[in-house]
Amino acid sequence: MTEATVKKKKKRKTGINTKSKKKTAVARAVIKKGSGKIKINKKTLETVEPKVVRKFIAEPLVLAGELAQEVDINVNTSGGGFMGQAVATRSAIAKALISIRKNDKLKEKFLNYDRLLLVDDPRRKEAKKPLGPSARRKKQKSKR
């Protein structure tokens, strides 16, 4: 076979994959042994703005303690707004930390702190109905 006929396979990310959702935002995290690097959409966690969102995303890392320094986490987010993506990212990181450690103590710690770290928010946008511009609103009625 010649080199032109042999297709190169894409290099797949190794590690443990987790997924989380919030509204229309989806975050997929890949966790593997490393030195504590956290990347969100190929950017480091320190570059995330505003600062409040950065601290919000880092909550599971603070709760995990030493474990966060032993692993590298890459998160890809898409859809939704910046806050929906932040909630989904935070949840994906927490799920990844639990899947690599397989520790009930850490899981209990996360559940006691905030249940949304491990459980996806099932709320979605309500579908639009007929006879109105949105899901619940109806056309205004004229009295005359």
Image (cartoon, grey):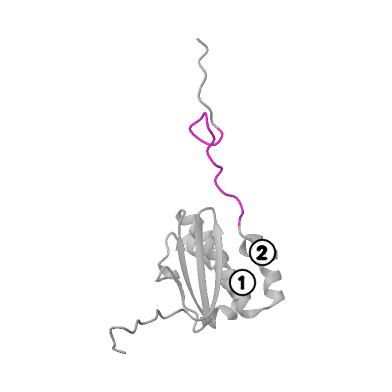
Residue at mark 1: 63
Viewed as shown, does residue 117 lie left or right of 5?
A: right
Say above or below: 46 vs 70: above
Q: Residue furthest front?
A: 1
Q: Residue 128 magenta-drawn?
A: yes
Residue situated in front as seen by the camera: 75 or 57: 75
Mark identifier at residue 113: 2
Quarter placement of the N terminus? bottom left
Residue at 44% over, 59% down: 50
- Give SS at disc 1: helix
Q: Position of residue 45 (x, y in %)?
A: 45, 70
Q: Which residues are magenta?
A: 121-136
Q: Residues within 10 Å of mark 2 (few under 14, many from 20)?
A: few
Q: Residue furthest top?
A: 144
Say above or below: 144 vs 16: above
Viewed as shown, does residue 95 lie left or right of 46?
A: right
